[in-house]
Amino acid sequence: MSFFDTDFHCHILPGIDDGAADLDVSLGLLHMQAAQGVRTVIATPHYRHHQQSVSRFLENRQTAFEEVKAHAFDGMPRILLAAEVALERNLSEVKDIASLSCAEMNTLLIELPLFESYHKWMAEEIEEISYRTRKQIMIAHLDRYVDMYSTKDYADILNIPDAIFQFNLSTFSDRKAKKLLKQLVKDEYPLVFGTDCHNLTGRKSNFDVLGKQMKKYEPSVIVERLFAGLE
Ligand SMILES: [Fe+2]
């Protein structure tokens, strides 16, 4: 398992969120990922606290995972379970939020609100979540906010202690997102990538982009540390 064969963000589990609608789509995505060089996928179905309890989510996720496991094929990437947790006010007060982390990596993937401009409470809430859960925070698709966030907004997010920043591979087809990524690479922030694939049509896996675009990239020590003990 390494930086170059791990998809850190995807919606491949069947019937659990707006990702893979059924088992056929799940297996289709996993075949696609395998062909693109993925050996490990971190399955990150959406979790929204105002819609669902953590325990119900974990049950549903397990059922979806078992379904895929029962149809595993030769060369199928290993699946690690996690979640893409939508940031809400006071989310840090939810007792069992830590159980949404990726157990193997001890990371918690947090999604900033997609249709809201940046507010100070967001970074503060994330810091509180990190403090209370003792999990390493991973910020989902940092590239998604380039049309909404100012440089100062981004600086707030980038200042969250010990956070890791995840970019979607679609970054490479967006001028502004690419510029942000370039800056973060230069400043040596800990970065990881994901396909954020949802289906076999508009949002399929594009993992092959990673090898093409980041060939000479050396992942940060903080990121390499995530893989320790996982082989
Ligand atoms: Fe996602």
Image (cartoon, rainbow, N blue to C red):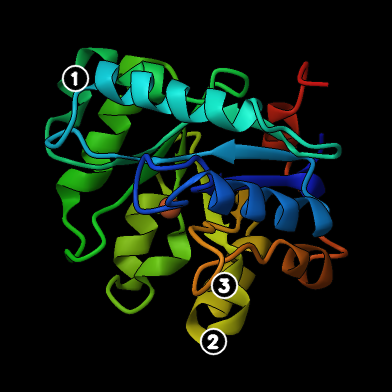
Graded by Cα atoms within 10 Å as few (under 14), some (14 to 19) or many (20 or more), the crowding at tag 1 reads: few
Residue 220: image x %, image y %?
73, 44
The residue labelled by disc 1 is 94
Amino acid type shown at disc 2: Arg
The residue labelled by disc 2 is 175
Looking at the image, which residue is at 44% across and 23% down?
63
Q: CA distance from mark 3 to mark 2?
A: 10 Å
**Mark with earlier residue (2, 1):** 1
Badge 1 element: loop
Amino acid type shown at disc 3: Ser
Residue 17 placement: quadrant: top left
Reply above or below: 124 against 58. Answer: below
Badge 3 element: helix
Amino acid type shown at disc 1: Val
Graded by Cα atoms within 10 Å as few (under 14), some (14 to 19) or many (20 or more), the crowding at tag 2 reads: few
Circles 2 and 1: CB atoms closer than 8 Å: no
Looking at the image, which residue is at 85% across and 37% down?
74
